[in-house]
Image (tube, rainbow, N blue to C red):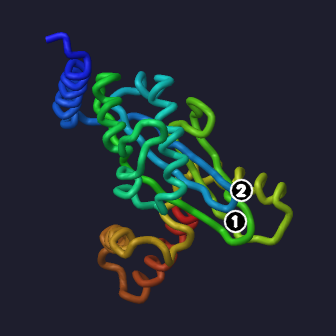
Amino acid sequence: NGDMEAAVDLLRAKGLAKAAKKSTRVAAEGLAGIAVNGLTGAAVEVNSETDFVARNEKFQAMVAEISKLALAAGGDTEKLKTMKYPGSGHAVAEYVAEMVATIGENMSVRRTAVLSVKDGVIGSYVHNQAAPGMGKIGVLVALASTGKKDELAAFGRLLAMHVAATNPVAMTIDGVPAETLNREKAILEEKNAGKPANVLEKIIANGLKTFAKENCL
C-alpha cells in the first residue's frame, strides 16, 4: 500500500521465515575462526551447508566478527549467541538467521572455546586457510612461561600445527575420558582372551602406553 517501512518489515519477516525452514538442513561445512588478543585466544566453529558458502566474503566477514566476540564469551556458546553483533543491533543468533535468509543456506554457531595465560603466549594455527584467521581447522595453544615472547610464539605455532596434524585426544593419558580407556582395554582383552591374568595385565598396561603415545599430546 505504498508504505516503505511496512514493506521492509514484510520482506524481513519473509526472509526469516525462509531461514526457519532451512534450519532443519544439515550444516556440516563452514569455517573455524581464531582470534587472539594479548594473553587470551578464542576459537569458534561456524557451520554452513556447503564449502561454497564458506568461501563467501560475507560469510567470512561474519565469522571474523563472531571470533572477536568469542574472546569475551569465555567459551560459552550460548552466551556468544546472545551477544550483540557489531553494527547490527541484533544478537549473534539473530544476525546469523538474517544471513541464512540472505545467502540461502542453513548456518549455525556450533561451538566456541577460550584459552588464556597470566604470563606467556597464545600460539595459534589455521589449516587450509580461507581468509586470515579462519580455515578448516583452528588450533589454540596456551604456553605459560616467562621466556622470550617471540621464541614462545614461534614454538606455540609449531605445537599448534602438530595438534592440527595429529588431533590428540588429551594432553596426557590422565586426561583421556574413562569411557575411551575402557573401550581400549576391552579391545585388548578380547584380542588376548584366554591368556593368564598376570600376562593380560601387562599386555593392557603396554597397550595403554602405546595408545598414549599415539593419541596424547
Instruction: Tell me the SS state at disc 1.
Output: strand
159 horizontally vs 113: left or right? right
57 horizontally vs 143: left or right? left
Instruction: Identify the amino acid type marked 1.
Output: Leu
Q: Position of residue 65 (x, y in %)?
A: 51, 40
Which residue is at 82% across, 60% downward?
149
Which residue is at 40% across, 72% downward?
177
Rendered view: 107 above or below 205 = above
Q: Position of residue 52 (x, y in %)?
A: 42, 22
Locate residue 121: give its quadrant.
Answer: bottom right
* Direction right: furthest residue: 148
Rendered view: 125 above or below 172 = above
Locate residue 93: give its quadrant.
Answer: top left
* Direction top: furthest residue: 2
Instruction: Kindly identify which residue carries mark 2.
Output: 156
The earlier-in-sequence mark between 2 and 1 is 1
Q: Nearer the viewer, residue 105 or 7?
A: 7
Rendered view: 3 above or below 107 = above
Instruction: Kindly identify which residue carries mark 1.
Output: 143
- Tell me how far mark 2 sits from mark 1, CA to CA: 7 Å
